[in-house]
Image (cartoon, grey):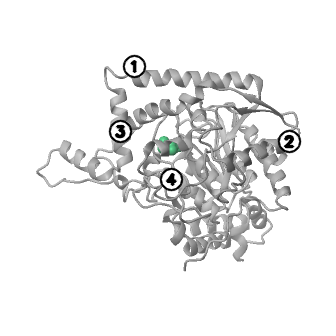
């Protein structure tokens, strides 16, 4: 059944529940697809063939024994290589962790396993999740299935490319400044950044601890919600985890009723620097939501314009501190340990060889921003801006239920286009970063193709803390309205890839 890879996770779940397909068959179909196309997409850093088939067989055995299984039991998934999985190589896209096999499962992985979700392997990413294109990965660039000459977004480009190329129906990403939503937008898939603290960071290799948020990637809104529900919820192992019920995301994704919903279009996230085709699709989607009964108004968030500079002080500061643990003594790579060098020299030789340029750039920036005499001027000031941005959200949510904008100013760009221009690269995240700074929920949903280049455009929805359900309400409404417009076809269907072997 080769078309198993074309099914959504919800459809696969039904097929397995009614015994029309086994998890081993479903898993094998996706492993075959990976073998056929990943030579050109390069979404995976590690494919765990044996482990995946063993997990699938275990689910099949449980089903045969009549055990009660969760809604995603037996469905395969691609895991961003920044989350630990016991015994499976985990690199965070860095040479410094090459060959490291974690001795424990992250909470996200524990929950995936408990839900019977089959982990196919680890996906490519920018080194330590720093980047917007996967070009900063130490293991090569992932290619966008819509156009192999373009980047798939980043840092979680591997996860989004994998689902877009039908190598997996589900994937996990992590979003610190947009790394789930921006690749989602660029690959025509759904990417959700849950409320900060709504999903556990335990076992997530930290980039910036006050921003990092694991979340679901899928081809449909319902699939993302099912995965969201499987991984979310309080975790005593993460001190910033929120001890509250998980928002009713699946119910919202099934319902999708936006009548009476108050939607605010963020004035500051559009205009100059935004690609015309992106703006056109965005405004059409807003129109569609209006027709479905939503009340749309324009809202101003005046401090959003300072989000990027604030982020690029806060993030490097936290990253420089988090990355200090890669000292050649504890994990992975060790260079220069020949019995003559001091421990300090070994540490510095290892960090020199093991970290890429962008990581070094941010460590230097962060160390500078945190150094005595500069702390107040840089880090302290950025934290104040962060508060102002959070207040913009609070004020906006007094008037509206959700805020919307394009997910990114442009569509996917060509490989090599922005890699030498960090500022141009950073600008990818203009729309996504405010939500990370404020910790609220946000998502990107496909809303059509730009006229100029025929590439996917993402519709960005932001909702208050622990109102992740509202994202799915809007996503589901948009998805069904667009499918109707497209003659019943979801625009998340990436073009056929040529099978490379
Ligand atoms: N592109 C952003 C950065 O480089 C976002 C990264 C992320 O969300 N992990 O910091």
Residue on which disc 3 sits: 363
Counting residues from the N terminus, which is met first, the one under dot 3 or under dot 1?
A: 3
Which sits earlier in the primary sequence, circle 1 or circle 2? 2
Q: Is residue 203 visible?
A: no
Q: Nearer the viewer, residue 159 or 69?
A: 159
Circle 2 residue: 257
Q: Where in the figure is residue 171, as x and y percent of width and height?
A: 61, 56
- Kindly indicate the quadrant of the structure image that contains residue 53: bottom right
Q: Which is more foreground, mark 2 or mark 4? A: 4
Real-space Cα separation, disc 1 to disc 4, in angstroms: 32 Å
Image height of 323 relative to 419, above or below: above
Say which residue label 1 marks.
Answer: 376
The quadrant holding residue 8 is bottom right
Helix, strand or loop at label 1? It is helix
Q: Nearer the viewer, residue 77 or 485?
A: 485
Return the disc, 1 or 4, that comes first in the chain's sequence.
4
Marks 1 and 2: which is nearer the front? 1
Secondary structure category for the residue under label 3: helix
Residue, far bottom:
501
Q: Secondary structure at mark 4?
A: loop
Left or right of residue 468: residue 50: left
| Between 103 and 426, the one nearer to me in the picture | 426
- Above or below residue 492? Residue 225 is above
Helix, strand or loop under label 2 = loop
For the residues labelled 3 and 1, the Cα–Cα distance comes to 18 Å
Q: Are marks 2 and 4 in contact (CB under 8 Å)?
A: no
Residue under the point 72% across and 64% down: 63
Image quarter (top left, top right, bottom left or bottom right) of the C terminus = bottom right
């Amino acid at each position: 059944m080769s078309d198993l890879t074309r099914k959504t996770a919800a459809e696969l779940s039904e097929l397995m529940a009614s015994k029309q397909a086994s998890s081993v068959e479903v898993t094998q179909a996706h492993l075959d697809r990976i073998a056929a196309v990943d030579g050109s997409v390069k979404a995976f850093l590690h494919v765990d063939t044996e482990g995946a088939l063993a997990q699938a067989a275990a689910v099949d055995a449980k089903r045969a024994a009549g055990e009660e299984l969760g809604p995603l039991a037996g469905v395969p998934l691609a895991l961003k290589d920044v989350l630990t999985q016991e015994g499976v190589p985990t690199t965070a896209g860095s040479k410094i962790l090459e060959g490291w096999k974690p001795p424990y499962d992250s909470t996200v992985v524990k929950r995936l396993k408990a839900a019977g979700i089959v982990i196919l392997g680890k996906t490519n990413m920018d080194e330590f999740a720093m980047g917007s294109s996967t070009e900063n990965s130490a293991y090569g660039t992932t290619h966008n299935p819509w156009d192999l000459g373009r980047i798939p977004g980043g840092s979680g480009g591997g996860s989004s490319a994998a689902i877009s190329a039908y190598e997996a129906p589900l994937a996990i990403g992590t979003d610190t400044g947009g790394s789930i939503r921006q690749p989602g937008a660029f690959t025509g898939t759904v990417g959700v950044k849950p409320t900060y603290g709504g999903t556990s960071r335990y076992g997530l290799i930290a980039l910036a601890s006050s921003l990092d948020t694991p979340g679901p990637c899928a081809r449909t809104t319902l699939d993302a919600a099912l995965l969201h529900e499987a991984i979310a919820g309080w975790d005593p192992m993460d001190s910033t985890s929120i001890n509250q019920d998980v928002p009713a995301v699946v119910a919202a994704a099934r319902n999708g009723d936006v009548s009476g919903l108050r939607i605010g279009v963020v004035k500051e996230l559009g205009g100059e620097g935004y690609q015309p085709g992106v703006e056109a699709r965005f405004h059409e989607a807003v129109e569609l939501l209006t027709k479905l009964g939503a009340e749309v108004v324009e809202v101003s968030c005046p401090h959003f314009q300072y989000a990027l500079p604030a982020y690029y002080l806060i993030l490097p500061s936290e990253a420089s501190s988090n990355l200090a643990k890669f000292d050649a003594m504890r994990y992975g790579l060790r260079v220069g340990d020949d019995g003559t060098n001091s421990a300090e020299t070994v540490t510095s030789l290892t960090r020199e060889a093991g970290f890429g340029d962008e990581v070094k750039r941010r460590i230097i920036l962060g160390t500078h921003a945190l150094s005595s005499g500069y702390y107040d001027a840089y880090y302290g000031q950025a934290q104040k801006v962060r508060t102002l941005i959070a207040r913009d959200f609070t004020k906006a949510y007094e008037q509206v239920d959700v805020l919307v904008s394009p997910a990114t100013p442009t569509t996917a760009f060509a490989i090599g286009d922005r890699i030498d221009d960090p500022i141009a690269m950073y600008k990818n995240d203009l729309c996504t970063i405010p939500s990370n700074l404020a910790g609220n929920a946000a998502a990107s949903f496909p809303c059509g193709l730009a006229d100029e280049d025929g590439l996917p455009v993402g519709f960005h929805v932001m909702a208050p803390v622990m109102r992740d359900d509202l994202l799915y309400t809007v996503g589901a409404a948009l998805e069904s309205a667009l499918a109707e417009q497209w003659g019943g076809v979801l625009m998340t269907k990436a073009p056929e890839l040529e099978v490379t072997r």
